[in-house]
Amino acid sequence: MKVINKISDMQRIACEVHSQGKTIAVVPTMGYLHEGHLSLVRIARDLADIVVTTIFVNPKQFAPNEDFERYPRDFERDKSLLESVNSDYLFYPEINEIYPTGYSTFIQMQGITKIFEGESRPTHFDGVALVVLKLFNITKADVAVFGQKDFQQTLVIKQLVKDLNIDIKIVVAPIVREANGLAMSSRNRYLSDKERENASIIFIALEEAKRAIASGERRRKIINSIIISTLRSVPEIKIDYVHTVKAHNLELADEFLPGEEIVMLIACWMGRTRLIDNSTTKIPINEFH
Ligand code: PAF
């Protein structure tokens, strides 16, 4: 695997790859890789001839009070993990390479960037959209793979691609979980053993709600209250939000329709660590009542 630090080198390589009639898949990450990231690289391998993984902890998607400085970083470990899953290139730029002195262009998105995660982190998605667009332009990828764990982020990126007519296919890959159900995340590193154990309640709450839906529950407020009461069984958890919405546009409905794909979204604090998770499911077609 070749490590590329400069934008001009990455763009030259991408042009060479395309001139040979080959395709490129990009897996954008912020590093401190785990099995979830590696699953994205494996999927990317099946989708294109050449896989470029990017590692860049993007300062523009962190608010000043957030964890940009302490975000975990381990380049050598990441590099060997990426070699183990056959990423062809690792694009690993310095901050000044992405945002040089005099950098002046920003993205401002409306709609779904303003709700849920966007309410708790108002500048977050504009920062994500900016860096993702830059990474698409730098890697000239034909397809990009993102994890479903950041469900709202995947919708924001699809919207960005649609609105700005970016010629790239977005693929969303399933959440990878620890043995206790906790969704894999680089931020899990912040959790103590006890917190990690307690955090399994998030997956239990999602599964509880899914079971109720499978047995006929379609009312949004009831589904949310099942999740909330399950989460509350662990007093150490502080809920930021719980929302059950239509999966394709995050719209609310008092009652979901048979056959509708919905998503249950959770954000909560476990001590000083903010965790997000989600689960999608289809409202059953069969009539229970
Ligand atoms: O999901 C992430 O790790 C980041 O938000 C992304 C997409 C790499 C942009 O910095």
Image (cartoon, helix red, strand yellow):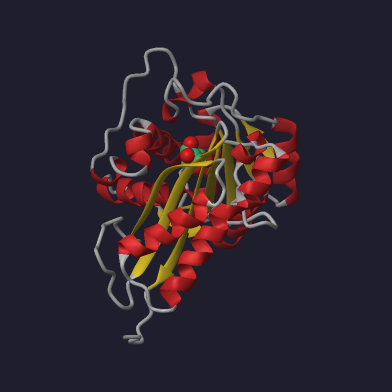
For this orientation, the residue located farthest to the top is: 101
- Along the viewing direction, whichever of 287 and 232 lies nearer the viewer: 232
Q: Position of residue 89 (x, y in %)?
A: 63, 42
Q: Position of residue 195 (x, y in %)?
A: 65, 41
Vertical placement of residue 264 versus 273, above or below? below
Q: Residue at x 32, y 60 (%)?
A: 221
- Along the viewing direction, whichever of 108 and 276 lies nearer the viewer: 276
Q: Residue at x 65, y 51 (%)?
A: 38
State whether residue 139 appears in this view: no
State whether residue 152 appears in this view: yes
Q: Residue at x 44, y 76 (%)?
A: 214
Image quadrant occupied by the N terminus? top right
Image quadrant occupied by the C terminus? bottom left
Q: Position of residue 154 (x, y in %)?
A: 41, 51
Q: Position of residue 82 (x, y in %)?
A: 69, 45
Vertical placement of residue 208 versus 135, above or below? below
- Along the viewing direction, whichever of 242 and 11 lies nearer the viewer: 242
Vertical placement of residue 72 versus 256, above or below? above
Q: Determine whether, in the image, residue 155 is placed left or right of residue 13.
A: left
- Along the viewing direction, whichever of 23 and 151 lies nearer the viewer: 151
Q: How many marks?
A: 0
Q: Residue at x 63, y 47 (%)?
A: 198
